[in-house]
Amino acid sequence: MTVLERILATALAPWLRFRSRPGRVQAALAGLDYAPAAQPQLPRVRVAAVQFDIGLAPSAEAFARHAYNCARQAVAGGAGLVIFPEYTTLPLLGLLPAAQRLAAWLDKPNQTLEVSETAEAYSTMAMALRLAAPAARRVYWETFSTLAVRFRVTLLAGSAIELGAGGRLFNVAYLFGPDGALLARQVKTHLVPSEVLMGYGVGEEIVVADTPAGKLAFPVCMDHTYFEPARIAVLQGAELLIDPAANNEYYEAYAQARGVWNRVQEARCYGVFCGAIGRVAGIVFQGRSGIYAPLDLTPSGDGVLAAAAEVEREQVVFGDLDYEALRAYRRRQPLEFNRTLYRRYLPEANSR
Amino acid sequence: MAEGRVVRVAAIQWAAPLEPALGTLTALIHPPLAQAAQAGAQLVVFAPGIDQALAAFAAREAEPPAAPEVRRFAAEQKLAMALSQRFDALGRALASQYRVVLALGSVLVRRLEGTVRVAYLYGPKGDLLGFQGQTHRSPAEREHDLLVETTLSPIDTPVGRVGLVTGADVEYPEVSRILCLQGAEILVHQGMLARFSEALALSRLWREVQANQVFGVEAYSVAEGCRGRSAIHCPVEMAPDRSGWLARAADDAQPAVVVADLDFDRLKQVTGAYPLHALRNPGLYRRYLPVIYDRSEDHDRA
């Protein structure tokens, strides 16, 4: 943390505390309609992926209302599990003074940056994230734990940007139960290059949560490009693999297929891709949220139970899962691992 | 390997005749190989089935069961007993005649302890460059009590380091990961499937190529009852249409010779911009792997 950043953090702290007071969120979420969610009748559950716009929010109240509207739509559609994407707290950079003006200034058409400018841009972005992180997380937590308890729904709140020891950034997803309590926390374990440049840290644990909506794991975004987190999760009992994602690129079907859709096929579980969309400071986020299953468990054989109609607009995607059907499929097509092979090679491979 | 390296590769999608005369078989093998060699291919991956056709000579009396995999298995069992030497001689002869690195197989090989499926790589001088036994079994192979191999290494060839992803190994990402962490640059898979789809195409070698940022050559049999669309794979970012395919067979039913150039400098640019392997998390893996596999009820047969 630089001297400038320390000065800014000290100067902005009262302002950000004021703008992120839990009372603001509670006021924004008061007096609204909260029809309770349908309770999952396991082994069946309806899940909803909220393709959420992560453009800057002008206030904590606006963010909370935005999240409420999406959650309400998901619950009204019968979902017993509601999922938000990665970087759900990015809109709360809007709590910083002049954030909207700065973002508009950065949002130049056809902008290209030199390498040195890119490094500087990431450094500036990392500083902004660190400055806003505590306030953003406060608003995020208050918003999603409140929505979970009021709708009485299991809610994966996507991920928040957090400050760890020494001011290091972490990308952390939170899962709330229908009582609003924290069920599980997953730190992103594989970074994208921009996160490396911004000095993010990684987690070294894959969490599996036993929830009213089933046993699930939610490694974050890039984690699903690697087979290891999915394999670890499923071997720990996960039957649903959730990918809260925020792909800062224009949508490409094949590029997206490299993630959780492929992990579902190899690990033999259900999957959800929940993508953020929107535009922040000239960075475009797109994705086609979807609910996935092994090829043999989908009507058209394409591994997709449901998918968003568009890749750049908000919408809620619903899918019905039947864990007993999954278990029957696994019994019919069991995997057979070669532990001798793995014991021989994986330790050395993973020491590199 | 030198900078500026471009390797031309070919995948031969082939329909093995069920019970050919020897002359017929030879006539069917040579034209696609000649086509690939004339196109300048340095590495040629031949679809499975040559072994099956060879086995037919020794198994004419066998009644072919309905399912292709079972039929293949029965035929290969006989081959394993009687024709492995003929297969090897054929591989050496074809590779040296066309001066290519030739991937052939897989074929069942009988050992003292049992039978294992093996894929072979022959060099342009007719030498055996290496082979790889299958490390995971399909459900049908489990029923027939095939053995699995417990060693796994890429093979150095004149065109680069090749990883043979043999048979059911393509369904287990551990295999390609182990091969690529040992330096495999080109993954090779030869498949024989009863059904095929575009979704399935993304769930086999395409997936492993994307996960490891290498090249891949995949050749399928289109013999009676078999489907598959052979392809040359690359990371999505390298394909002109961003699909991850440099070239594909026109369909999944007809014989074809698929040719493409593997540009290793371009691959280096892609991996440099987005270094998947450098961004791995060894601390996470060491915590769980390989111990986590002990939680599985599925056991190995090594």
Image: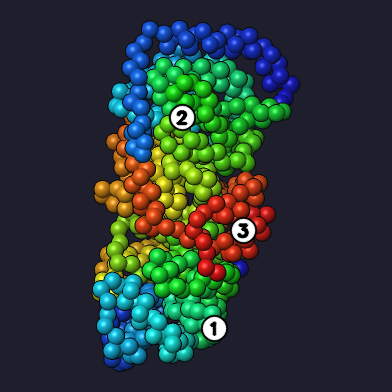
Residue placed at 31% from the left, 79% from the top? B16
Residue placed at 44% from the left, 76% from the top? B106
Q: How far apart are labels 3 and 2 at the CA level?
A: 32 Å
| Residue pointed to by mark 2 | A156
User: Where is residue A249 shown, x and y percent of the image?
Assistant: 44, 38
Residues tagged by mark 2 and mark 1 found on one chain of the structure: no
| Residue pointed to by mark 3 | A346
Left of B158 or right of it: where is A272?
Answer: left
Image quadrant where one finds the C terminus of chain A:
bottom right
User: Where is residue B148 shown, x and y percent of the image?
Assistant: 51, 71
Residue B190 in view here:
no
Q: Chain ID for label 3?
A: A
Closer-to-camera residue (A209/A133): A209
At mark 2, the secondary structure is: strand
Q: Contact (CB < 8 A) between labels 2 and 1?
A: no
Look at the picture and state if B290 lies above or below A23: below
Closer-to-camera residue (A175/B87): A175
Q: Could you tell me the amino acid type at mark 3?
A: Leu
Residue placed at 38% from the left, 23% from the top? A71
Q: Chain ID for label 1?
A: B
Left of B8 or right of it: where is A200?
Answer: right
Residues tagged by mark 3 and mark 2 found on one chain of the structure: yes
At mark 3, the secondary structure is: helix
Residue A68 in view here:
yes
The first of marks 3 and 2 along the sequence is 2
Look at the picture and state if A155 lies above or below B12: above
